[in-house]
Image (cartoon, rainbow, N blue to C red):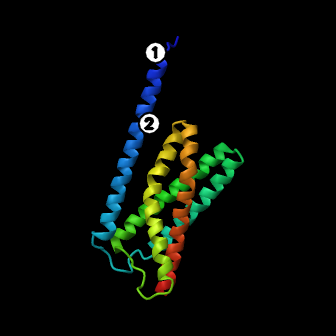
């Protein structure tokens, strides 16, 4: 038998659990962002330029696969195919995670690669890269919160956050590929 007093207490406990989980996600996201900033702008590169030279192309492939998985997942949810949607979104998460590991490895070994100062399209590349970086920082906690809500069965909250997460995550994945292509073209 459930009493009236126990129902609000359980809802309160669920809200406290959600708040703690979201706080942990924000803390982890901030730590990851600070680590990447340190890695890219402070940490010295440790490898020759030819060692693991394939990593930027691999990063673009992972971003492209993540974007494709996101679009497939979106199509599945529009068709109300929940199981397939979940599989596609987990696949996108795996590709984005593999991208992050490869990205960290590349920057640990090679440091930051700059767009040539006098190359064509520099005025397009730099704002695109800036928006990609800023929105990637925003997308990381949103992706994690969206997954938390989904996996914990909080579907109404999942839907609300996913409306923001999906376009940001897709933008970051697509612009990751575009910035790589533009950098490759500029380097010849």
Dot 2 corresponds to which residue?
A: 18
Image position, residue 33 (x, y; %): 36, 58
Residue 165 against residue 24 in the figure, above or below? below
Residue positioned 56% across, 48% down in the render: 162
Image position, residue 68 (x, y; %): 61, 61
Dot 2: within a 10 Å radius of its alpha carbon, few (fewer than 14), some, or many (20 or more) residues? some
Tell me if label 2 and label 1 are in contact, CB under 8 Å.
no
Task: For marks 2 and 1, give the CA distance.
Answer: 21 Å
Find numbered disc 2 in the image and state the secondary structure of the residue it sits on. helix
Give the residue at the far right of this rendering.
79
Residue 52 against residue 99 in the figure, above or below? below
Residue positioned 47% across, 73% down in the render: 127
Dot 1 corresponds to which residue?
A: 5
Image position, residue 137 (x, y; %): 42, 59
Of the residues under marks 2 and 1, which one precedes in the sequence?
Answer: 1
Q: Quadrant of residue 157?
A: top right
């Amino acid at each position: 038998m459930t009493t009236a007093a126990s129902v609000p207490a359980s809802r309160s406990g669920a809200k406290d659990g959600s708040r703690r989980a979201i706080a942990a996600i924000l803390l982890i996201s901030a730590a990851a962002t600070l680590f990447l900033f340190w890695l890219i702008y402070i940490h010295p590169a440790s490898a020759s330029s030819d060692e693991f030279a394939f990593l930027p192309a691999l990063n673009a492939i992972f971003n492209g696969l993540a974007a494709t998985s996101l679009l497939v997942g979106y199509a599945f949810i529009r068709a109300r195919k929940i199981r397939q949607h979940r599989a596609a979104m987990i696949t996108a998460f795996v590709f984005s995670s593999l991208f992050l590991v490869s990205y960290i490895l590349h920057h640990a070994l090679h440091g930051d690669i700059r767009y040539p100062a006098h190359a064509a399209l520099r005025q397009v590349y730099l704002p695109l890269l800036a928006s990609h970086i800023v929105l990637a920082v925003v997308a990381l906690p949103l992706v994690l919160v969206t997954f938390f809500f989904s996996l914990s069965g909080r579907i109404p909250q999942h839907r609300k956050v996913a409306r923001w997460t999906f376009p940001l995550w897709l933008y970051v994945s697509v612009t990751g590929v575009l910035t790589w292509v533009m950098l490759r073209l500029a380097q010849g």
